[in-house]
Image (tube, helix red, strand yellow):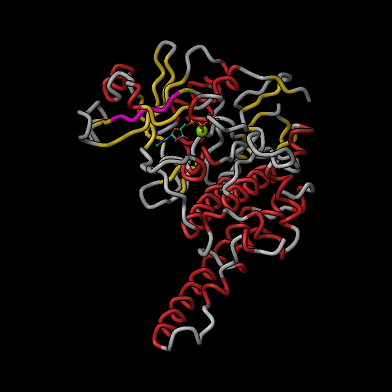
Amino acid sequence: MGICWSAKIHKAESPAHTGVNSSKYVSSNSDESISSSKVSSSVPPTPRSEGEILQSSNLKSFNFADLKISTRNFRPDSVLGGGGFGSVFKGWIDENSFTAAKPGTGMIIAVKKLHQESHQGHREWLAEVNYLGQFSHPHLVKLIGYCLEDDHRLLVYEFMPRGSLENHLFRRGSYFQPLSWSLRLKVAHGAAEGLAFLHSSEAKVIYRDFKTSNILLDSNYNAKLSDFGLAKDGPTGDKSHVSTRVMGTYGYAAPEYLATGHLTAKSDVYSYGVVLLEMLSGRRAIDKNRPSGEHRLVEWAKPYLASKRKVYRIMDNRLDGQYTMDVAQRLANLAFRCISLESKLRPTMEEIVEELDQLRDLEITENQSKTRNGSRQRRRSAGDVVNKIAKDAYPRPSASPP
Ligand SMILES: Nc1ncnc2c1ncn2[C@@H]1O[C@H](COP(=O)(O)OP(=O)(O)OP(=O)(O)O)[C@@H](O)[C@H]1O
Ligand SMILES: [Mg+2]
């Protein structure tokens, strides 16, 4: 299937993506519309037309003038980020009337403003209203409303104070401290719960754009998925997949999806595996600034993931001393299964959530035993007790045997 660079792709390479080499793509052939034959017991069938989608959602319809005031005329210093769709601005509204409020008062919102005259953008805007208008889940970002006025297309979200996982993993600077091991586990778990919900019989949706920039963090580092522009209803009846044109972001899409356009929930599981690898290694899915042979994270990491003894080589050295090898090995193994070339061998998101439940419990037990051993050690004379932390925490890659 041929892949062409769409307008969206060029826009995806915005300053916010500096150093990022995984960019959006969309194949040129076949048309794809937001349509659905979904029938689920708890969610009504997805409406088809734009009018029906807008009418059936419980979202607030904002007028453009209000959003302009609330973002201080979309001032450049209100920009929270930018992607292929457009830019995201910080704004303020009154929490009761939802009208523009003075900066610093009322409720903070994030306003995504679509680049004008983008057909693909309109389609994604509508898909976002369609899905986020129906679903409410602790691990999906809340869409408050939208604006459709002349050729203006905007989306109004709850504000996520800690921004995206991408910023926390890859942005260098004093504002973004490297995410600790336990926060990485928390985020991996929350994001898995979001995806598991989407794949559940309640929602039956394939997300199709799972990546670090679409995982947003609230003040307590709860992960919430945003950006449903590429989401699709899962297959119905006895169908094994949905046929689509190939869309997504380089570095995250499952190989069989790229090759055939056949989309399944297991395509999301592959992307989840890539994100898990990014969290373990602190490396981007695609990074052309690295030496040759290390551009594609999956290809570089795979041989190390397959061997328990080599796992330490892929670990982010900013995590040194924070993790225990048991948990790191099991997470690496989980990532390894997620990125399996054979989609049937990949776990389901539900299984992934269960595994992460166990790993977080194990991490807590290990940390408690570290603390206990630490205090016992302090009571005894120094040096006569093997330091459990040093023993369990994996050695720094530089200090490890080749
Ligand atoms: N609700 C929100 N609260 C706070 N920041 C947000 C919110 N939504 C988006 N952002 C910020 O804006 C950035 C850009 O988001 P956007 O979805 O437009 O682009 P992207 O995910 O980087 O790329 P793509 O267009 O490929 O999805 C995010 O990475 C995040 O930092
Ligand atoms: Mg996004």
Q: Give the side of residue 44 with respect to residue 347, left or right.
A: left
Q: Residue at x 66, y 56 (%)?
A: 313
Q: Main secondary structure of the magenta part?
A: strand
User: Quick check: can you spot residue 145?
Assistant: no
The answer to if 27 sits in the magenta stretch is no
Q: Residue at x 48, y 17 (%)?
A: 115
Q: Position of residue 214 (x, y in %)?
A: 51, 38
Q: Residue at x 48, y 60 (%)?
A: 182
Q: Is residue 379 above or below residue 71?
A: below
Q: Position of residue 14 (x, y in %)?
A: 51, 24
Name the one closer to the observer, 85 or 155: 85
Q: Which residues are magenta?
A: 87-91
Q: Position of residue 257 (x, y in %)?
A: 74, 36
Q: Is residue 364 above or below residue 275?
A: below
Q: Position of residue 129 (x, y in %)?
A: 47, 30
User: Quick check: can you spot residue 390?
Assistant: yes
Q: Residue at x 66, y 29 (%)?
A: 247
Name the one closer to the observer, 81 or 387: 387
Quarter of the picture containing the C terminus is: bottom right
Res 21 quadrant in image: top right
Quarter of the picture containing the N terminus is: top right
Res 292 quadrant in image: top right
Name the one closer to the observer, 36 or 355: 355
Q: Is residue 209 above or below residue 86?
A: below
Res 375 quadrant in image: bottom left
